[in-house]
Image (spheres, rainbow, N blue to C red):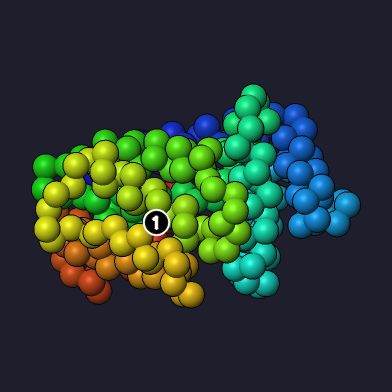
Amino acid sequence: MDIRVFKGLNAEWALVCAEPGAGARVRGWLEDAGVLTPGEGPAELEELLAWLGVRDRRVGREHSDRWMGALLAVAAGEGAWARLAARVVVQAMVNGAVRTTLSLLRPGRDFDEVGQVVVAALYGVVRAYPLHRTGKVAANLLLETLHRASRELRDDDPQSLGWDAELAGLASGEDVAEAACRAGVVEQAVAVGLVEGAREWEPARAELAELR
């Protein structure tokens, strides 16, 4: 399984993080949006994103909705700062993009080629995100990425993981997105011979998660 697309994405992320002032700029946007208090959180971008992830797990989805929403508002603009904001959100969604890629695998499909479609779809979703949708942001990003990538791949397999627009409106939308992708991942990973069954999925998932 060729995973160049995600290795490349992480290599690019390292360069983004190395840009002087990138972390301070992103933290400043979050301060302006009232998500962080002045000086709160690491100043380095890579550390800041990791810190936000830890805080999300401690505080809950509402926190991720707030900081992602703040960055998506910047990403909707033009220029270098909009691209930086979009890139931060994309990096936060890398694990979800890996799961989505696996869920779209079929016999004859190359992981890296499908991954490129998924990453391109994710970028498009991030840049065009409807800012009035302030709840379940990560779930909505993941579900719309799945929808766009499936359409791009012309996935007409009746057994494939389908897109249901109503999922995004469910109260447990984030859990639904996770469960839907996990179910599709296990089924398709088994179908293409990546793993032998559901019990083998967790080690495979852990290995891919190390790409983050």
Relative horizontal placement of residue 76, taking residue 143 as reference (left or right) = right
| Up/down of 199 relative to 177, above or below | below
| Up/down of 203 relative to 117, above or below | below
The residue furthest right is: 38
Q: Nearer the viewer, residue 121 or 135?
A: 135
Relative horizontal placement of residue 25, taking residue 13 as reference (left or right) = right
Residue 167 in view (yes/no): yes
Residue on which the image places disc 1: 143
Specify the quadrant of the image occupied by residue 190. bottom left
Report x, y in % for residue 109.
17, 42
Specify the quadrant of the image occupied by residue 77. top right
Residue at 57% in and 38% down: 87
Residue at 63% in and 52% down: 69
Report x, y in % for residue 149.
31, 44
Relative horizontal placement of residue 154, taking residue 119 as reference (left or right) = left
Report x, y in % for residue 211.
44, 48
Residue at 14% in and 49% down: 156
Report x, y in % for residue 164.
31, 62
Specify the quadrant of the image occupied by residue 199. bottom left
User: Dot 1 lies on which element?
Assistant: helix
Residue at 40% in and 36% down: 120
Residue 42 in view (yes/no): no
Give, as a three-letter code, the residue at label 1: Leu
Q: Nearer the viewer, residue 131 or 4?
A: 131
